[in-house]
Image (cartoon, helix red, strand yellow):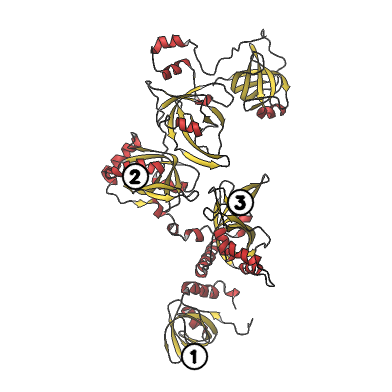
């Protein structure tokens, strides 16, 4: 396992706190422009995911990349997560992984 | 009951002596009450009190239950057969002698005071020419039910039919037959169940009528089967063709009122799926038409009708009436439903269908507009305010998930160690759990299926010439199908366990039918598809609904975990469950 550049699980609220770090999140795709995708995080924050996305995208997409600001990520990896992802569960995971159980995550 | 103090002397032990009725006589002794002496016997079941030294020579005992009988093949003497006794004092120094003479005729007082009069005397005195049954009552001593035991000779009881079962048919290895039973109550309120088979059942089925009083004699008693007993009595009665049943006409019939012990509707939750039967009283809110329900074990169609009852707790409950209660009494209720009668029902089962629901069983007893203070109170409550009150179904107040199918899979979730660490789990009755686990091993060389009848799924045997014989359907078929019955090993993070899985569940685990798997097994070739199929089934996780029960195997109790349902993992739902557990753990630490 490559542990050289770990990516933290984030939702919309956590994104700003980790600017410049490598992060991973899951968004619901709500639109796309040239060079970026507009997505909704699991805690209902609208963010921009920059970079060239593969086509087609499913409703839910996981992106791994560098947090640029509290509402944008420069994506390196895109993964389709299908159309039936449970956003609440992921949101809880983000909270646990950055809160009480932070020590368990890289 | 008369209590007699006796001094025992001269014990004589007999090892497996002779048998009297069902009673193996094991020891003989002379009993002496200071005035008289009588030979007495203790049955083998009481031997331990002698060998343990509780009853000694010249010891003082109190007789709690006994009969005095002639012993076939013995002399004219009567023998005292002790069925229950207790030691009062240890051995005395010597036999108390107050001119003891062994008596021929027994002088012990009978258990009930009974003035012996000749039959003609009584008839002259009291009845003139009354009905034969009445004479029977006069001339025969009527025994209280509580005094009956299997070792007694002739007796007559006077009892009221307080519950009459329906005629049931059965089929077993010895053939077909029918059976029905009644519940009898005597004046003292003691109850006993009487069972009749075949010809006796046919003979007495119409004789016995609910609520009427009868003289009964020449029945036999045996120990009651605790599993099936419905009344408080250590014994149950069997009536055969020779038994005498006579209605007590022209007599002031005593009425042991059906004793109700009402549970308020909002208190029913505590009884869900318990063995205990309950009584309810309520105002009829609605009555459904009859429906036909196919009973799963024998495919028989049985009528059912649902009624809704309400009481002062402002809760309603659905009661399912079955069989005759659905068609007969149910129709009566439907006709008068708009008048909102009060009904009292004795002996109902409480189930978890729709949260909480009630169901009649064969011995349930329904009384419409009973003449009781409870009924009057309920009726006046209903007329004054109940009618206008909004009421809710008792079931809907239960855990919200209880109403949909998800309850079975997501509640009472346990891990395997919860089941395996408690070997006595399911001792009383089977308990149900849900558990998420991996199939870790399916032994390929086990007998994992049986040949089943295509109609009834029961086991078939190979017929003489060709084809298969089904004992259940009593017919032969050219073909049969295979049905799984297999043991699988399952694992989770807490341990391992063996589950038994039957056809439908095993099919989901293995991923093909037993017939299909058998085909793979018989195929020859380099790659054994059969082995591959079983390997594929291993290390996949499922959600299991299991029952845990105890089975006796070689007189040793063993836990048996049976798969009642298998479903694929819903990962989102499982995650939610894990999140719940995490937050529960957080709050508890």
Name the residue beneath numbered marker 1.
A52
Name the residue beneath numbered marker 2.
B312
Front position in the image: B462 or B521: B462
Front position in the image: B372 or A100: B372
Image point (48%, 33%), residue name? B201
The secondary element bearing badge 3 is classed as loop
The answer to whether the residues at label 3 and label 2 have Cβ atoms under 8 Å apart is no
User: Residue B479's image quarter?
Assistant: bottom right
The secondary element bearing badge 1 is classed as loop
Q: Nearer the viewer, mark 2 or mark 1?
A: 1
Image point (67%, 62%), residue name? B443
Position of B112 relative to B447 (above/below)? above
Image mark 1: chain: A
How many angstroms separate mark 2 from mark 1 (CA)? 69 Å
Label 1: how many Cα within 10 Å (few below 14, some 14–19, many 20+):
some
The secondary element bearing badge 2 is classed as loop
Name the residue beneath numbered marker 3.
B463
Image mark 2: chain: B
Report if residue B167 is visible in the image: yes
Position of B326 relative to A21 (above/below)? above
Image point (62%, 52%), residue name? B465
Q: Which of the image's four quarters has the N terminus of chain B?
A: top right
What x and y, as percent, mark residue B211? 39, 30
Q: Closer to the N terminus: mark 3 or mark 2?
A: 2
């Amino acid at each position: 396992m490559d542990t050289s550049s770990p990516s933290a699980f984030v939702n919309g609220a956590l994104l700003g706190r980790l600017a410049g770090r490598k992060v991973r999140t899951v968004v619901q795709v709500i639109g796309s422009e040239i060079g970026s995708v507009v997505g909704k995080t699991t805690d209902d924050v609208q963010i921009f995911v920059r970079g060239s996305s593969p086509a087609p995208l499913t409703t839910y997409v996981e992106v791994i990349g560098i947090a640029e600001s509290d509402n944008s990520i420069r994506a390196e990896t895109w993964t389709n997560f299908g159309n039936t992802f449970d956003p609440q569960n992921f949101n809880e995971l983000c909270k646990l992984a950055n809160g009480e159980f932070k020590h368990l995550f890289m | 009951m008369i209590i007699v103090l006796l001094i025992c002397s001269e014990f004589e032990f007999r090892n497996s002596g002779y048998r009297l009725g069902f009673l193996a006589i094991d020891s003989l002794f002379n009993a002496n009450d200071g005035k008289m002496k009588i030979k007495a016997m203790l049955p083998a079941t009481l031997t331990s009190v002698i060998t343990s030294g509780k009853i000694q020579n010249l010891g003082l005992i109190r007789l709690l239950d006994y009969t005095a009988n002639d012993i076939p093949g013995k002399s004219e003497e009567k023998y005292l057969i002790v069925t229950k006794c207790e030691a009062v004092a240890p051995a005395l120094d010597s036999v108390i002698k107050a001119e003891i003479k062994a008596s021929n005729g027994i002088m012990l007082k009978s258990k009930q005071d009974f003035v012996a009069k000749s039959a003609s005397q009584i008839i002259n005195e009291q009845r003139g020419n009354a009905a034969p049954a009445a004479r029977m009552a006069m001339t025969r001593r009527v025994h209280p039910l509580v005094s009956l035991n299997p070792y007694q000779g002739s007796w007559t009881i006077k009892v009221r039919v307080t519950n009459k079962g329906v005629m049931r048919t059965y089929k077993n290895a010895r053939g077909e037959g029918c059976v029905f039973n009644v519940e009898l109550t005597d004046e003292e309120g003691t109850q006993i169940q009487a069972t009749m088979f075949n010809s006796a059942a046919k003979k007495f089925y119409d004789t016995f009528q609910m609520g009427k009083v009868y003289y009964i004699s020449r029945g036999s008693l045996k120990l009651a089967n605790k599993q099936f007993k419905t009344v408080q009595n250590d014994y149950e009665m069997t009536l055969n063709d020779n038994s005498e049943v006579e209605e007590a006409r022209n007599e002031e019939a005593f009425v042991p009122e059906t004793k109700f012990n009402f549970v308020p509707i909002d208190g029913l939750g505590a009884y869900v799926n318990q063995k205990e039967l309950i009584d309810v009283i309520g105002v009829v809110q609605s009555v459904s038409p009859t429906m036909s329900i196919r009973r799963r074990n024998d495919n028989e169609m049985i009528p059912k009708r649902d009624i809704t009852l309400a009481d002062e707790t402002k809760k309603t409950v659905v009661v399912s009436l079955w069989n005759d209660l659905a068609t007969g009494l149910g129709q009566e209720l439907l006709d008068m439903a708009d008048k909102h009668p009060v009904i009292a029902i004795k002996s109902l089962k409480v189930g978890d269908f729709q949260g909480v629901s009630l169901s009649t069983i064969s011995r349930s007893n329904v009384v419409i507009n009973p003449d009781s203070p409870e009924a009057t109170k309920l009726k006046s409550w209903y007329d004054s305010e109940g009618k206008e009150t909004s009421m809710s179904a008792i079931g809907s107040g239960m855990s919200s998930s209880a109403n949909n199918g998800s309850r079975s899979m997501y509640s009472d979730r346990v891990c395997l160690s919860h089941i395996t660490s408690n070997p006595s789990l399911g001792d009383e009755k089977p308990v149900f759990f849900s558990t998420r686990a991996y199939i870790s091993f399916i032994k390929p060389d086990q007998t994992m299926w049986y040949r089943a009848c295509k109609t009834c799924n029961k086991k078939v045997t190979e017929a003489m010439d060709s084809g298969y014989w089904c004992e259940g359907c009593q017919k032969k078929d050219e073909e049969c199908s295979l049905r799984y019955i297999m043991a699988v090993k399952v694992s989770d993070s807490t341990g391992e366990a063996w589950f038994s899985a039957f056809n439908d569940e095993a099919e989901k685990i293995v991923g093909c039918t037993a017939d299909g798997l058998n085909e793979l097994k018989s195929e020859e070739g380099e790659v054994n598809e059969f082995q591959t199929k079983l390997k594929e089934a291993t290390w996949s996780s499922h959600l299991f609904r299991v029952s845990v029960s105890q089975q006796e195997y070689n007189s040793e109790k063993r836990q048996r975990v049976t798969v009642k349902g298998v479903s694929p993992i819903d990962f989102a739902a499982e995650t939610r469950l894990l999140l719940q557990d995490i937050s529960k753990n957080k709050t508890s630490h």
